[in-house]
Image (cartoon, helix red, strand yellow):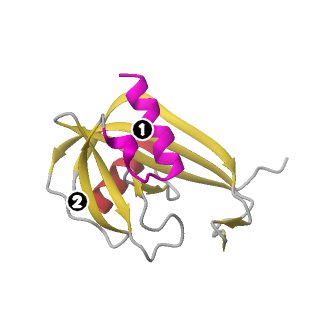
Amino acid sequence: MDFPKVLIVVRCFIKKDGKILLLRRAKEERSNPGEWELPGGKVETGQDLSSAAEKEALEETGLLVKITSPKTYSETGINPPIKDGVPHKYPGMLHVGLTYEARVVSGRVKLSAEHFEYKWVDSKEVLDFDLTLYSRKAITFFLDSD
């Protein structure tokens, strides 16, 4: 039996004082430059999913976070050969996206090079931002399930 190669991306829906943390992708980024998204990244070999989400949030934001709920948004698809007019980095691979609800344990926001701006946004305004499609779907899921 032949199993597909899988790219797993984990993200964190982080709420603090009723506001949601958004990161703005660097304009030099290959995909979705300048768009807003939830913190996260690719799962590495040997990582479990929730630990990977917490690690990615720390790397991208400087915040130590903890997954707070079993509630998870998921989406799957096959990566296209070209995305946004640019050859996809992982064409043809099964893409699995998982977003976990998390809370801040400690730290102050310090962005990685992948992002150039962050905002804590009121839930009533968050969908007005130029969000990546995946982040828009995940945020809508969490807001609808509150």
Query: How would you rate the neighbour count of disc 2 (Cα within 10 Å): few for under 14, some for 14-19, many for 20 or more?
Result: some
Q: Identity of the amino acid at label 1?
A: Ile
User: CB atoms at circles 2 and 1 under 8 Å apart?
Assistant: no
| Numbered badge on residue 139 | 1
Question: In this picture, is 55 found above or below 102?
Answer: below
- Give the residue drawn at x 45%, y 34%: 140
- The picture places residue 21, in percent across and down from the top left corner, at 28, 47
Q: Which residue is under mark 2?
A: 62
Q: Nearer the viewer, residue 123 or 104?
A: 123
| Numbered badge on residue 40 | none
Quarter of the figure that contains the C terminus: top left
- Give the residue drawn at x 46%, y 46%: 135
Residue 51 in sight from this viewpoint: no
Query: How would you rate the neighbour count of disc 1 (Cα within 10 Å): few for under 14, some for 14-19, many for 20 or more?
Result: many
- Residue 33 sits inside the magenta stretch: no
The extreme right residue here reads 1
- Give the residue drawn at x 20%, y 64%: 110
Circle 1 sits in a helix, a strand or a loop, which is it? helix
Residue 78 in sight from this viewpoint: yes
Magenta region: 125-146
Q: Identity of the amino acid at label 2?
A: Gly
Pick whichever of labels 2 and 1 is earlier in the sequence. 2
Q: In the figure, residue 7 lies in which quadrant? A: bottom right
- The picture places residue 29, in percent across and down from the top left corner, at 47, 72
Q: In the figure, residue 121 lies in which quadrant? A: top left
